[in-house]
Image: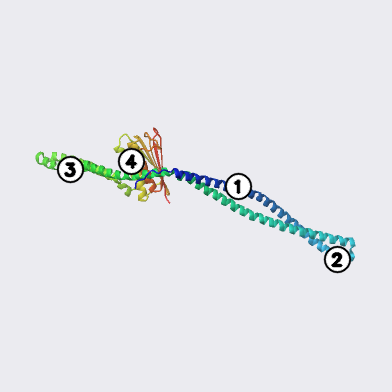
Amino acid sequence: MSLKKIDVRTLDQILEKMINTVDSSKSEIFQIGEQCRQEYETLSDELKEVKVMVSQVIDEGEDLEVKTRQSRRRLSIVSQHFRDYTEEQVREAYEIAHNYQMKYSMNLELEKQLRRRRDELERRLIHLEATIDRANNLVSQTSVVLNYLTSDLKEIGSALEDAKEKQDFGLRVIEAQEEERKRLSREIHDGPAQMLANMLLRSDLVEKVYREQGIVNALEEVKSLKKMVRSSLSEVRRIIYDLRPMALDDLGLVPTLRKYLERTEEYNSGVTFRFINLGQEYRLPSKYEVALFRLVQESVQNAIKHAQASEIHVKIDMQQDSVFLIVKDNGKGFDVREKKEGSFGIMGMRERVDIIDGKITIDSKIGEGTIVMIQVKFD
């Protein structure tokens, strides 16, 4: 189904109203949270003071309790032997006991009031803390919604454009597959097939030379024929290697990359390669090895064909939970922000990286070369 261009003016108006409403709600929630936070700080200070007062009252109460018991014992002794004491001494003992009892009772009542106030403050602080947390969560959630409204939804046009590009990319992939089949057909026809036809003719020539010129000249023809066979075999192996290097299945990613770069350097005079393995060397699941190899292959071919680089560095760092790849060249570079019509190489690389849940970063400037960084993490 073809993608049509959509007028999003009405949608933008609706989004603007939604953004204003959400932004206003966010401000109100933030104000509520700030008010609760200020009240929380005030009550926290009061709670500290109340706790200090409770501690002081308890200490005073313990002292008054001791003095009250002592005064009661004194009053009890005086009451039992009142004949041995004067009236003034009896009255003094009674008043002292009464005063300490009153102070102790008042102290207990004050302690109860302070404890109630302390408990009330602690309950209010818990309630305020929960309100502040809810306000913070709501502010955070509204921020996410606001960000979604102001960024993601406003990029609908860009998303549609990306979808169109992916549709074009899919069609381009189909075309590229057909072109690749044609290229392989031409290569096999012009290369190995033509060489096999020539070898058949040369084999007939060997028989003729043997009959007419003798064994020595026939052996020379056989040597020439063997050279042609080696060339044909090398060409067949090159075609097979381009389709899928068998070393990838047999040896793994690092040895295959090393061999690929050596062969590529042989086929491209004037281009120097440097391969560095910084980490461990172990086998990865097949899908990762194939994807990473193709990504390096694509980066190298871009550097040779498009960037016209003379030096290409490939670094790989394999750890137990990740693989990090860098392909750096000294080519002419390009503007990464510019999208060339009909160019799907970088998009294809990004699609391949997405398949293995990796990340790719392409850094390039005109005249300063290109750096391709690929990172894949494993669970």
- The residue to which callout 4 is attached is 261
Identity, as a three-letter code, of the amino acid under mark 3: Ala
Q: Earlier in the sequence, mark 4 or mark 3?
A: 3
Q: In the image, 81: left or right of 62?
A: right
Question: Residue 310, image x and y in percent?
Answer: 34, 34
Q: Estimate the spatial distance between the alpha carbons at disc 1 and disc 2, rounded to whole Å.
A: 65 Å
Residue at the farthest top position: 367
Q: Circle 3 is placed at which residue position?
A: 197
Disc 4 crowd, CA 10 A, few/some/many (<14, 14-19, 20+): many
Residue type, mark 2 in image: Ser
Q: Which residue is mark 1?
A: 34
Q: Are marks 3 and 1 in contact (CB under 8 Å)?
A: no
In primary-sequence order, the first of circles 3 and 2 is 2
Helix, strand or loop status at disc 4:
helix
Which numbered disc, 4 or 1, marks the residue that appears first in the sequence?
1
Q: Position of residue 14 (x, y in %)?
A: 48, 45
